[in-house]
Amino acid sequence: MSFEHHSAASGRAAAEPAPVSVGLVGYGYWGPNLLRNYMELQGARVSWVCDARAQQIERALTRYPSVRGTTDCAHMLADDELDAVLVATPISTHYELARAALEAGKHVFVEKPMTASAADARELCELAADRGLTLMVGHTFVFSPPVRKVKQIIESGDLGDVYFVTTSRVNLGLHQKDVSVVWDLAPHDLSILYYWLGEAASTVCVLGRDCLGSHNPDVAFINLRFPSGIIAEVQISWLSPVKLRRTMVVGSRRMLVYDDTENVEKVKIFDHGVDFRDPQDFGEFQLSYRTGDIVSPKIENVEPLYVEASHFVESVRTGGRPITDGEAGLQVVASLEAAEHSLHHGACEVPIDVGERWVSTAPE
């Protein structure tokens, strides 16, 4: 290689941004998936794994010997070269861990739900904004190619005005000991709905029950009203003979079905609808039913978790506002909190209030 070529290559290498140093807290159910994806990211360097259980640290370091491990989160946060922290622990610990990381000057990615209360979520949002740090929530479905395709279809106007949305997320298990089915399953569909519609629900009412006597509701029907007039129903259950992950969006022009259990055609657009003709006299009432083509758009095949990890690293590097930022996490937590209140108070309609609005310092 000539001196000129060598110098140019060196200049390009020098221009490359340093990888974002990342530490993971929680190597349990979801932590290994996060760690695997961040280890594959060229723009990230996993420096730490933290878990209160020593045996989990041993497991992580056996697989990834280049990573340092600790059972003391404070030890990891004391590393001045650490840029960002991934929190993948039980919900009850999210607030304390995320707050400690933000106070240590670290960018934070926290798994959903963001916190166990809207007040805690709002505090984290304000803290991140005050410190100029990135705060992102792990609403992984928002980074799923089928979900992103549906958003494109809705925003294109192909469905017309959206009337209502119904979703079913049911399965036989897994029963959670510390949270109801609302906190366990609803975050997925709430984050998807809010992403698709570009707005959060204004009110919620929930009918559910504890079928097994565990003092934890295991089935719930969540009804949402949106400021635009759209309504939605989210059906969730740990008691079902089949696994369903199906959503139907009904618009004024077309209808759409998103079925995450399908292997190939996860999204289908139905050129179906009903046209109402204004009556010319008292006795006239006519509806025209339309049944047309069914189209399944081509969707790329990429792991949502990898896309999510890439987005977090890019947000940290550029200071850009993540799609699933703290405010998005706060909206979901406030909705869950209101839903839980309705569930335990006779299915009353409850306003969803995120509290005093705050403005992120991060650019759009």
Image: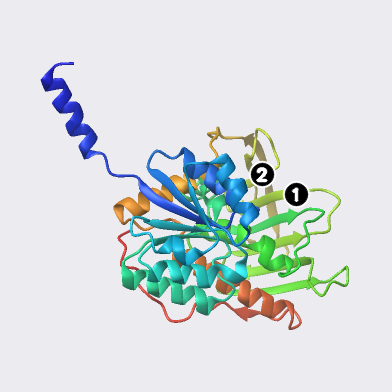
Quarter of the figure with the N terminus:
top left
Relative vertical location of residue 4 with respect to residue 138 in this rendering, above or below:
above
Residue 188: image tag = none
Residue at 32% x, 73% y: name it.
130
Quadrant of the snapshot with the C terminus: bottom left
Q: Nearer the viewer, residue 82 or 315?
A: 82
Which callout, 1 or 2, points at the residue further toward the start of the chain?
A: 1
Query: Whole-percent x and y of residue 112?
Result: 57, 61
Q: Residue furthest left?
A: 4
Q: How many marks?
A: 2
Q: For this rendering, which residue is in front, 33 or 190?
A: 33
- Residue 131: image quadrant is bottom left
Give the colour scheme shown.
rainbow
Q: Quadrant of residue 162?
A: bottom right
Question: Taking 241 as reference, is 128 left or right?
Answer: left
Q: Position of residue 205 (x, y in %)?
A: 68, 75
Residue 252 rendering spot, x and y as whole percentages = 58, 53
Secondary structure beneath label 2 = loop
The reply, left or right, for residue 248 in relation to residue 133 is right
Farthest residue to the top: give it: 1
The image shows residue 167, relative to residue 90, as above or below, that is: above
Determine which residue is flagged by label 2. Answer: 260
Residue at screen point 70% across, 42% down: 261
Residue 244's tag is 1
**Amino acid type indicated by mark 2:** Asp
